[in-house]
Each structure stands twice: as structure tokens, then as C-alpha cells.
């Protein structure tokens, strides 16, 4: 199978996953449907990043980004409900749970969701007809360069104690998803790839608790948990920093210009 065909197959697999997640969300069969849908969308966005300048790719990139933004508040609500339920705050959880189904339904019938599935059907011919896809070895080289650049950006971020941890979380996630899809051309070892996953989890825990602290400033029924969440946020960030130190020792050496590595991370 050619590298271009492998690339198309990766996104087609994610498209199938999206169809399944959407069906589960429509039928309200399990609480992980929206989460799984969003993971597939994130993976698609990560795979599209290396070809963002290829003609015809912009509509799918934009559609995926819009669905990500659209579903973020509902997913945040799911996570908050789970946290409150785990803490035995059933009344607070139930007040929020009543908003879930309307949120799901709004996302399912949205123009953003429709546009995403339309663009997923339309994009393969545009890619296959591009000059990049028809240049011998060009597409594989593009993916290799993208992976190398991601690693270089990670190096820069890990060496900068002031680098925004929210941006770093996105960078880690994007590097992980791209590496998992194209492990054979990734400069990362299996141990480094595993470390990425661990770092992503730790930063995710910190991010959740940080966001909950901000929520507690606005939603008065959450204030009793504010101090616990703040303490948990600090612990989670400390754990993440330790894992980041481990990751920094597992990354290969920087191999592109530092000015490329300094480019900002976009969500």
C-alpha cells in the first residue's frame, strides 16, 4: 500500500469511528459516545496538520475544528457531572445532567456536524489529485518532516519553564496522535511514545482541576469543592512536571531550526 493510501485509510478509519460514535450519541446508549467522537475529531485534526497547505484540505480542517469547539462545553459538562457524582453531590450533578440531552441534540443537528461528515466524504479526491500526493516519496517525506518538527517543538517547550502548559498539553496530544498513526516513520522510540501518553494523561488531570477551580468562581454550588480542586490541581501539575522531565530524556535530538520549533501551538 502506498503511503498516500495508508494516510487516506487512517482518516477513513476515523470516519467510521465517527459514524459509530454519532449513532451511539443519537440513541443515547452509553456515556462515552461524545468523548469517543471528540477523540476521533482530534485525531483527524492532528493528521491533517501536515497537509494544511495542500489545496482542498482547508474545508475539512475547518469543519473538524468547528465540531471540536461546538462540543467542548457539553463534554466539559459531562466531566463535571462525573466528578460531582463521584463526590456524592447528586443534587448538583442532577441539576447539570438535565442539560446534557439538549446539548447532544443541538450538536447532532448542527450545521457544523453536517459539514464535517460532508467534508469527510469529499476530501480524498482532492488529496489524491494534489501535486504532493503525486510526487514520488513526497507525501511520506512531508509526514516525516511534520513529526520531526513536532519533536523539535516539544524540545523547545520542555526546555522553557515558562512555556504555557495549556499549549504544551495540545502539543503533546498532537504529537502522540500523529506518532500512533505513523509509528514506522516517527523519530520517537516506543518508550518515548508511551511517555507521551503518560504526560498527556497527567496534563489532562491538571487541566480538568484547573478548569473546575475557574468554574467554582462562577457557579456558587461548586464553591465547597474549590479548595480541594486547587490542591488537586497543584498535585496534578507536579506529577505532570515529573513526567515531562522523563519525556525530555527520551526525545531524540533536535534536527530542525529552532525558529521552526518556536512557532505557537494552535488548538
Image (cartoon, rainbow, N blue to C red):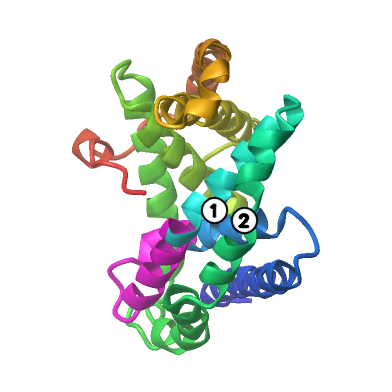
Is 126 placed left or right of 184 in the picture? left
Quadrant containing the N terminus in the rendered view: bottom right
The residue positioned 37% from the left and 49% from the top of the image is 267
- Which residue in the structure is indicated by mark 1? 74
The residue positioned 41% from the left and 81% from the top of the image is 127
Does dot 1 land on a helix, a strand or a loop? helix
Q: Is residue 216 magenta?
A: no
Q: CA distance from mark 2 to mark 1?
A: 7 Å
Splitting the image into 4 quarters, where does residue 163 fall?
top left
Q: Are the two marked residues, 2 and 1, in contact with CB atoms closer than 8 angstroms?
A: yes
Q: Is residue 206 visible?
A: no
Report the mark closest to the observer, 2 or 1. 2
Splitting the image into 4 quarters, where does residue 56 fall?
bottom left
Q: Is residue 87 visible?
A: yes
Q: Earlier in the sequence, mark 2 or mark 1?
A: 1
Mark 1 nearby-residue class (10 Å; few <14, some 14–19, many ≥20) = some
Does dot 2 land on a helix, a strand or a loop? helix
Question: Looking at the picture, does residue 150 appear above or below residue 110?
Answer: above
Q: Which mark is residue 252?
A: none
Question: Looking at the picture, does residue 16 appear above or below residue 246?
Answer: below
Is 237 placed left or right of 85 in the picture? left
Percent coordinates x, y for residue 82 in the rendering: 69, 38
The residue positioned 41% from the left and 27% from the top of the image is 214
Which residues are the magenta region?
Answer: 45-69
Is 259 placed left or right of 117 in the picture? left
Question: Looking at the picture, does residue 195 appear above or below residue 34?
Answer: above
- Which residue in the structure is indicated by mark 2? 100
Percent coordinates x, y for residue 206 in the rendering: 52, 24
Percent coordinates x, y for residue 92 in the rendering: 64, 35
Outermost right residue: 29
Splitting the image into 4 quarters, where does residue 236 fall?
top right
Amino acid at each position: 500500500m502506498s503511503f498516500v493510501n495508508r494516510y487516506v485509510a487512517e482518516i477513513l478509519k476515523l470516519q467510521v469511528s465517527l459514524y459509530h460514535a454519532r449513532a451511539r450519541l443519537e440513541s443515547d446508549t452509553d456515556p462515552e459516545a461524545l468523548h469517543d467522537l471528540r477523540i476521533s475529531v482530534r485525531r483527524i485534526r492532528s493528521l491533517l496538520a501536515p497537509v494544511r497547505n495542500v489545496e482542498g484540505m482547508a474545508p475539512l480542517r475547518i469543519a473538524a475544528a468547528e465540531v471540536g469547539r461546538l462540543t467542548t462545553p457539553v463534554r466539559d459538562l459531562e466531566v463535571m457531572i462525573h466528578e460531582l457524582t463521584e463526590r456524592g453531590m447528586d443534587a448538583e450533578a442532577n441539576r447539570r445532567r438535565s442539560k446534557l440531552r439538549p446539548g447532544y441534540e443541538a450538536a447532532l443537528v448542527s450545521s457544523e456536524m453536517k459539514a464535517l461528515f460532508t467534508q469527510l466524504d469529499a476530501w480524498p479526491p482532492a488529496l489524491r489529485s494534489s501535486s504532493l500526493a503525486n510526487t514520488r516519496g513526497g507525501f511520506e517525506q512531508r509526514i516525516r518532516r511534520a513529526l520531526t518538527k513536532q519533536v523539535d517543538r516539544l524540545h523547545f517547550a520542555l526546555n522553557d519553564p515558562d512555556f504555557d502548559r495549556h499549549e504544551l498539553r495540545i502539543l503533546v496530544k498532537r504529537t502522540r496522535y500523529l506518532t500512533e498513526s505513523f509509528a514506522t516513520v516517527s523519530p520517537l522510540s516506543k518508550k518515548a511514545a508511551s511517555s507521551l501518553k503518560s504526560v498527556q494523561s497527567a496534563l489532562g488531570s491538571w487541566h480538568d482541576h484547573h478548569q473546575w477551580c475557574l468554574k467554582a468562581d462562577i457557579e456558587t454550588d461548586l464553591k465547597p469543592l474549590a479548595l480541594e480542586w486547587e490542591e488537586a490541581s497543584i498535585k496534578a501539575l507536579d506529577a505532570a512536571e515529573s513526567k515531562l522531565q522523563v519525556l525530555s530524556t527520551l526525545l531524540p535530538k533536535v534536527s530542525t531550526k529552532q525558529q521552526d520549533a518556536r512557532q505557537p501551538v494552535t488548538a
